[in-house]
């Protein structure tokens, strides 16, 4: 097993063409600092053939240090778990099925409407 310092950083992959996504990534980066790498799927999709392009287009993807992949709300909570004081969201997601279900539904709705929400919020 590699020492943690030699392990790759966890990676959150997002839609680089989405203004709302970019704003959320900026906020996430401000919380996690250098603990998490952030890349647009348009930059990395070809390097990660195990993730179909449809999954990148539908939701954020998170590749953890061990290579495990999560998507949607779970991806966001896993990324935020690397920020001081934010691990509780992942704990709720993992241990409270109702929280996980609601989180994924809200995430899916926002993801489907992200371009309209970007315009509505004046982020274009």
Image: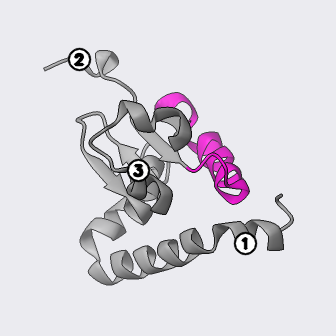
Residue holding disc 3: 53
What kind of element bears circle 3?
A: helix
Mark pair 3, 1: CA separation: 23 Å
**In this rendering, is residue 120 above or below 44?**
below
**In this rendering, is residue 52 above or below 33?**
below
**Disc 2 vs disc 3: Cβ atoms closer than 8 Å?**
no
Q: Residue furthest right?
A: 122
Q: Can residue 89 be seen in this view?
A: no
Provide residue 108's location: percent of width, then percent of height: 48, 74
Mark pair 2, 1: CA separation: 42 Å
Residue holding disc 1: 117
User: Residue at 29% of width from left, 33% of height from top?
Assistant: 65
User: Residue at 37% of width from left, 58% of height from top?
Assistant: 71
Locate residue 97 relative to residue 87 in the image: left or right.
left
**Disc 2 vs disc 1: Cβ atoms closer than 8 Å?**
no
Residue holding disc 2: 3
- Look at the image and say whether residue 19 sits in the magenta stretch: yes
What kind of element bears circle 2?
A: loop
Badge 3: few (under 14), some or many (20 or more) residues near its Cα, within 10 Å?
some
Locate residue 47 relative to residue 119 in the image: left or right.
left
Range of residues picked out in magenta: 15-36
Q: Could you say which quadrant of the image residue 121 lies in?
A: bottom right
Determine the main secondary structure of the stretch shown in magenta.
Answer: helix
């Amino acid at each position: 097993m590699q020492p943690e310092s030699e392990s790759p950083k966890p990676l959150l992959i997002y839609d680089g063409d989405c203004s709302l996504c970019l704003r959320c990534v900026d906020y996430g980066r401000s919380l996690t600092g250098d603990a998490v790498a952030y890349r647009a799927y348009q930059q990395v999709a070809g390097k990660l053939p195990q993730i179909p392009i449809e999954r990148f287009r539908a939701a954020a993807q998170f590749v953890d240090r061990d290579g495990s992949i999560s998507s949607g709300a779970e991806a966001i909570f896993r990324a935020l778990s690397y920020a001081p004081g934010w691990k509780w969201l992942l704990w709720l997601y993992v241990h409270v099925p109702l929280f996980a279900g609601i989180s994924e539904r809200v995430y899916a709705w926002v993801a489907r409407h992200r371009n309209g929400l970007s315009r509505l919020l004046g982020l274009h």
